[in-house]
Image: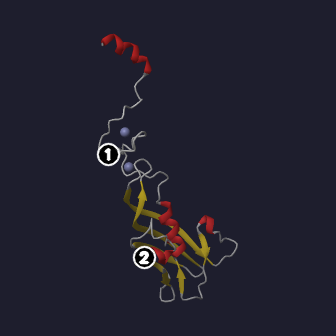
């Protein structure tokens, strides 16, 4: 995913781009399969380029609790600096190399980083997901099973006998 900077005047610009996951290096074909749209605010200066980007796509996950596949939207914003000052360049800090003499820059690494920031640590199809029965594996979101849950407090057992 590239921006043609040769034709951009110095100053502020807004650009909208679209691309497939492979165009930003997210081409596993599983989690990322859908189109990515990117809104860019950029500030072009002689020796640097400041980019604020907002990336939208959706990702395909598998729920940690019920193991069902689900899809969730990603909408994430982040800022990047592209600079000719080689002392500053540090991709870990989102500062990339900028060569103002070249006609275009590749923003794929920045878009990829932004999207990955939107990937959650835990994958839940919903906050209320009931998960699988630990005994029979039934998806408890879809049906109930006859398994006895061992969640009752054993201290009640004596009392239950009395009630019987
Ligand atoms: Zn689930
Ligand atoms: Zn069960």
Q: Indicate which disc, 2 or 1, sits on the residue closer to the N terminus.
A: 2
Label 2 CB sits under 8 Å from any ligand 1 atom: no
Query: Which mark is on residue 141?
Result: 1
Q: Is residue 13 left or right of residue 49?
A: left
Tell me: residue 51, above or below residue 141.
below
Q: Is residue 58 above or below residue 141?
A: below
- Seen at 48% across and 78% down, the residue is 23
Q: Nearer the viewer, residue 97 or 137?
A: 137
- Residue 150 lies, in percent from the top left, at 42, 29
Figure coloring: secondary structure
Give the number of the mark in front: 2 or 1. 1
Q: Is residue 58 left or right of residue 89?
A: left
Q: Is mark 1 within 8 Å of ligand 1?
A: yes
Alpha-carbon span between mark 2 and mark 1: 33 Å
Choose between 152 and 104: the one closer to the eye.
Answer: 152
Residue 135 placement (x, y as % from top left): 42, 39
Residue 55 found in image quarter: bottom left
SS of the residue under disc 1: loop
Residue furthest to the right in view is 87
Helix, strand or loop status at disc 2: loop
Give me the residue at 60% from left, 70% from top.
95
Residue at which label 2 appears: 20
């Amino acid at each position: 995913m590239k921006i043609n900077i040769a034709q951009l005047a110095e100053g502020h610009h807004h650009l909208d781009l679209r691309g497939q996951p492979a165009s930003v290096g997210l081409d596993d074909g599983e989690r990322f399969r859908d189109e990515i749209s990117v809104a860019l605010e950029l500030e072009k200066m002689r020796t640097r380029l400041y980019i604020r980007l907002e990336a939208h796509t959706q990702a395909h996950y598998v729920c940690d609790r019920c193991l069902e596949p689900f899809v969730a939207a990603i909408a994430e914003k982040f800022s990047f600096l592209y600079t000719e000052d080689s002392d500053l360049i540090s991709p870990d800090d989102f500062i990339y190399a900028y060569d103002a003499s070249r006609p275009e820059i590749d923003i794929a690494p920045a878009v990829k980083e932004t999207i990955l920031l939107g990937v959650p640590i835990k994958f839940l199809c919903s906050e209320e997901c009931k998960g699988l029965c630990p005994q029979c594996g039934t998806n408890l979101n879809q049906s109930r099973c006859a398994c006895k849950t061992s969640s009752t407090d054993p201290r009640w057992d004596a009392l239950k006998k009395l009630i019987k």
